[in-house]
Amino acid sequence: MPLEIVRNDITQMRVDAIVNAANEHLAMGGGVCGAIFAAAGVEKLSHACAQIGFCKTGSAVITSGFALPAQHIIHAVGPVWQGGNAGEIELLRACYDSALTLANQNGCKSVAFPLISSGIYGFPKDIALSVATAQIGSFLLRHEMDVFLVVFDRASFQLSERLFHSINTFVDDHYVNTNAALYARRTDETFVSMKKPAQRKAELTQPSAAPMPTQETLERMLQRAGESFTQRLLRLIDERGMTDPEVYQRANLDRRLFSKIRSNRDYRPAKNTALALAVALRLNLDETADLLRRAGYALSPSSRADLIVEYFFRSENYNIFEINEALFSFDESLLGS
């Protein structure tokens, strides 16, 4: 999965580079910075940083990882929050861009970030998160790299209050509606079972009011009925005039996995992979249900994860990274490979 949000200690991440939330003087600090210095080796890392000397806010520099599992440490200097009107958001965006560019220039295939500036620098966590996923997501639409956004605990991660409330309300409402519909159906079934056999038989033999499909519609349905998941996926890609890289990047999928799907007519993906592809193709709910059915799945009103995804489809928000922020916030599995 090109961008994955994980709970972990960033100093334990086995990646090509980890990102340190540094200060301009590249001195050992507290929080994530202090933990990275301690794990890498204070003396050696301090010496390497002293040789560089200075890094302005919004920029990044690179050193060895020393005793860390990671080969490199990218020191990215985020801004201090001053209320939002002092260019802090632009500087934080530049900070992520600088770190990712530096990682790419040094041949890194995997990078782990903390949520920069969200600690003692005071950035509201929801804004820090939004900037991080937007900038990383934008980079991944142009480059292939595995990027991890590492949070230590629940307190380190926060959706905007408005979005969290909207999703929570949607999920609660649909759970209520689903349960009400289930109760009504069971009541109807009980009522039907109380009818006399002759009455039930008469009702069942009444002609249906549903319109008959035309010959053209029926032929089209039969022609497409036997399509596998892969066949339907490739047809949808062609119909939308999209390229393979555009699809797998927007789906947060690894290129190698997408190649497996494309080359195997009978490939059966995981449900989260199928949903990610529906997001990339910007399918509506009916189209998504049809694509999922080809892989043997369905959106379930009894699944909180499915309802969260449905919320974004209904809102016509097809940003895979924002969807995954929400899923992570609700302790659900992320979309993608």
Image (cartoon, grey):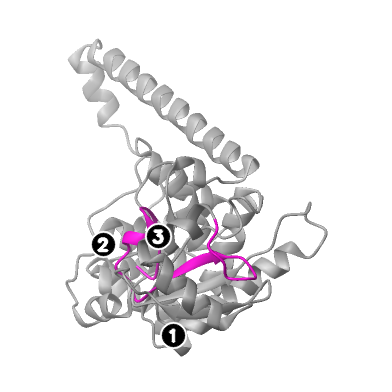
Q: Is residue 242 visible?
A: no
Q: Is residue 37 left or right of residue 293?
A: right
Residue 185 placement (x, y as % from top left): 34, 23
What is the quadrant of the C terminus in the image? bottom left
Q: CA distance from mark 2 to mark 3?
A: 51 Å
Q: CA distance from mark 1 to mark 2?
A: 22 Å
Could you tell me the amino acid type at mark 2? Arg
Tell me which corner region of the image, top left, top right, bottom left or bottom right, holds residue 239: bottom left
What is the quadrant of the N terminus in the image? bottom left
Residue 240 placement (x, y as % from top left): 48, 78
Label whose residue precedes the other's in the sequence (2 or 3)? 3
Queried whether the magenta region covers residue 6, the answer comes back as yes
The label shown at residue 243 is 1
Q: Which residue is mark 2?
A: 294
Secondary structure state at the residue bearing disc 3: helix
Please provide the residue range marked out in magenta.
Answer: 1-29
Of residue 102 and residue 240, the one placed in the foreground of this image is 102
Where 268 sits versus 300, above or below?
Answer: below
Of residue 275 and residue 221, the one placed in the foreground of this image is 275
